């Protein structure tokens, strides 16, 4: 089983733009490479806003087939945390996996 995460953040250019109920608009979210500190969709380097974002957890089998996936959405009123986003999206994705019956056939 392979677990991958993708983080989506809001760039500085959307500062002050908030969706309904304080959630970020999906059209303003861009893939963000945390290790490089850059948005992959932009040629010019741009900083992410400290608040709001989205984390996607994808669970695949050894053949690359997606078994489960889910998200964690961070409100525009909360600071974005990679660790919390990974934890919440992982727990949600794991809860969607089919349970195996390991009762030994009894």
Image: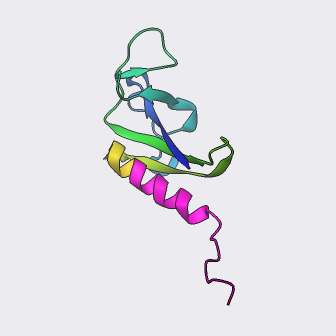
Vertically, is 99 above or below 81? below
Percent position (x, y) of residue 16? 39, 32
Q: What's the residue at 47%, 49% (across, down)?
A: 73
Image position of 103 (left or right of 30) = right
Q: Quadrant of residue 99?
A: bottom right
Vertically, is 19 above or below 88? above
Percent position (x, y) of residue 50? 31, 35
Residue 95, magenta (yes or no): yes
Q: What's the residue at 42%, 9% (across, down)?
A: 44
Residue 70, magenta (yes or no): no
Q: Bounds of the magenta span?
A: 86-105
Spot the residue most to the front: 104
* Number of numbered discs: 0
Percent position (x, y) of residue 57? 52, 47
Spot the residue most to the top: 43
Q: What's the residue at 45%, 39% (across, down)?
A: 18
Image position of 80 (left or right of 31) = left
Percent position (x, y) of residue 3? 51, 46
Q: What's the residue at 54%, 60% (across, down)?
A: 94
Vertically, is 72 above or below 97? above
Q: Does the image show residue 76?
A: yes
Relative depth, front residue between 22 and 93: 93
Relative depth, front residue between 1 and 95: 1
Q: Does the image show residue 57?
A: no
């Amino acid at each position: 089983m392979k677990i991958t995460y993708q983080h989506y953040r809001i760039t500085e250019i959307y500062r002050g733009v908030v969706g309904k109920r304080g959630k970020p608009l999906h059209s303003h979210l861009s893939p963000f490479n945390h290790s490089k500190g850059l948005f992959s969709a932009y040629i010019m380097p741009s900083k992410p806003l400290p608040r709001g974002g989205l984390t996607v957890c994808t669970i695949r089998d050894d053949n690359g087939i997606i078994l489960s996936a889910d998200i964690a959405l961070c409100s525009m009123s909360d600071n974005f945390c990679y660790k919390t986003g990974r934890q919440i999206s992982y727990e949600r994705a794991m809860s969607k996996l089919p349970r195996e019956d390991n009762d030994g056939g009894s």
